[in-house]
Image: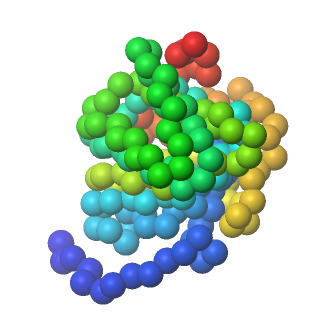
């Protein structure tokens, strides 16, 4: 496979934004533009929002907190991460999730290597305008089943919302 040697510039206004749950995920660098090596996603998470507990085999993930404060949660720990903090979920790391603990939206930069998380978001979510949050309506049983199937396809396993309580 020939590597693309062209420098690329993207920004949130020109990138695709996907809604999953009550959060918005803007794909700044996807699998197709990194030869499958890297995905970079800007996450906009409402107060008290965040992904359900999940795990992924075969890729690692970093979260850099741009704005706000989140709590990273595993079975063993609950660690606050504030603006300027970097959280690393190692390769084949623990079941985890995070929650926005601030009263305002949190903004995070998520870096995934190797790439692929973008494909899960594109398939499981729906497109929304950049800079907006989706309607916070709870997912239907059909949407939950589809998200679980899609997650498995991309090397992830989703757990019930209260799994780490």
For the C terminus, give its image quadrant: top right
How has the structure been colored for display?
rainbow
Q: Position of residue 71 (x, y in %)?
A: 55, 32
Q: How many marks?
A: 0
Percent across and percent down for residue 40 are: 43, 60
Residue at 28%, 67% in the rendered image: 35
Out of 33 and 91, give the one closest to the viewer.
91
> Which residue corresponds to the image point at 75% horizontal and 40% vertical from the top-left?
103
Q: Is residue 163 left or right of residue 88?
A: right
Q: Is residue 116 visible?
A: no
Query: Which residue is found at the position 63% from the left and 62% from the top?
Result: 17
Please indicate whether residue 16 sits to the left or right of residue 114 in the image: right
Give percent across and percent down for residue 81: 50, 38
Q: In this image, 65 relative to 30: left or right?
A: right
Q: 64 above or below 90? A: below
Residue 90 image position (x, y, % from top left): 28, 37
The answer to whether residue 72 is visible is yes
Q: Measuring 49% from the left and 67% from the top, which residue is drawn there?
A: 28
Can you tell which quarter of the image residue 42 is in? Answer: bottom right
Looking at the image, residue 60 sits to the left or right of residue 146; the answer is left
Front-most of residues 41 and 140: 41
Q: Is residue 98 above or below residue 25?
A: above
Instruction: Depth check: give the residue in front, 51 or 80.
Output: 80
Residue furthest bottom as drawn = 6
Q: Is residue 78 above or below residue 57?
A: above
Question: In the rendered view of the protein, which quadrant contains the N terminus?
Answer: bottom left
Q: Is residue 87 above or below residue 66?
A: above
């Amino acid at each position: 496979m020939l590597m693309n040697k062209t420098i690329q510039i993207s920004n949130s206004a020109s990138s695709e934004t996907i809604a999953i749950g009550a959060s918005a995920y803007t794909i700044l660098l996807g699998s197709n533009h990194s030869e499958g090596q890297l995905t970079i996603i800007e996450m906009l998470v409402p107060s008290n929002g965040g992904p359900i507990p999940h795990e992924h085999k075969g890729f690692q993930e970093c979260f850099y907190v741009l704005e706000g404060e989140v709590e990273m949660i595993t079975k063993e720990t609950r660690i606050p991460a504030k603006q300027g903090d970097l959280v690393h979920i190692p390769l084949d790391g623990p079941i985890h999730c995070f929650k926005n603990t601030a009263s305002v939206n949190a903004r995070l930069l998520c870096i995934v290597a190797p790439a692929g998380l973008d494909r899960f978001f594109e398939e499981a979510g729906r497109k929304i305008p950049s800079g907006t949050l989706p309607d916070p309506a709870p997912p239907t049983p059909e949407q939950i089943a589809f998200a679980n199937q899609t997650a498995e396809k991309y090397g992830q396993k989703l757990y019930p919302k209260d799994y780490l309580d």
